[in-house]
Image (cartoon, rainbow, N blue to C red):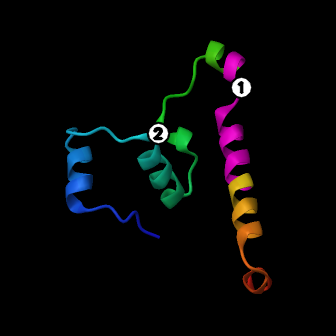
Amino acid sequence: MELGWSEVYMSRRLRGKVPFNVADLDSIARLLDVPVTTFFESPSPLGKAIFGDLDDAAARRVNSDEEVRKSAKPDYLRAAA
């Protein structure tokens, strides 16, 4: 899998001319097979108390996304998987 970004697109982000957006980070995380939260600092104890464990939430989302992708396949492709 590749990101499909042009050199200009990537260069502008790597040089800090344009910030990475959430969709960019999500694409990179999927390519590297890591939670998108990998790119952010760990929340403070107060943040954890309010928002819970983001890594668990991200793992649930990835698993849920995979289930959706599997169920969206035509029957003839599901049998081959």
- Considering only order in the chain, which callout, 1 or 2, is on the residue closer to the N terminus? 2
Q: Is residue 62 magenta?
A: yes
Name the side, left or right, on which 72 lies relative to 37: right
Secondary structure predominantly adopted by residues drawn in magenta: helix
Query: Which residue is painted at 67% across and 52% down in the image?
Result: 62
Q: Amino acid at mark 2?
A: Phe
| Element type where label 1 sits in the image | loop
Mark 1 = which residue? 52
Query: Which residue is painted at 64% across and 12% down in the image?
Result: 46
Q: Amino acid at mark 1?
A: Gly
- Front residue (pair 40, 4): 4
Where is residue 34 shown, x and y percent of the image?
56, 51
Mark 2 = which residue? 39
Extent of the magenta region: 49-63
Q: Are marks 2 and 1 in contact (CB under 8 Å)?
A: no
Name the side, left or right, on which 11 lies relative to 41: left
Residue farthest toward the top in the current orientation of the protein: 46
Relative to 5, does residue 58 appear above or below in the rendering? above
Where is residue 37 shown, x and y percent of the image?
55, 38
Name the side, left or right, on which 68 lies relative to 29: right
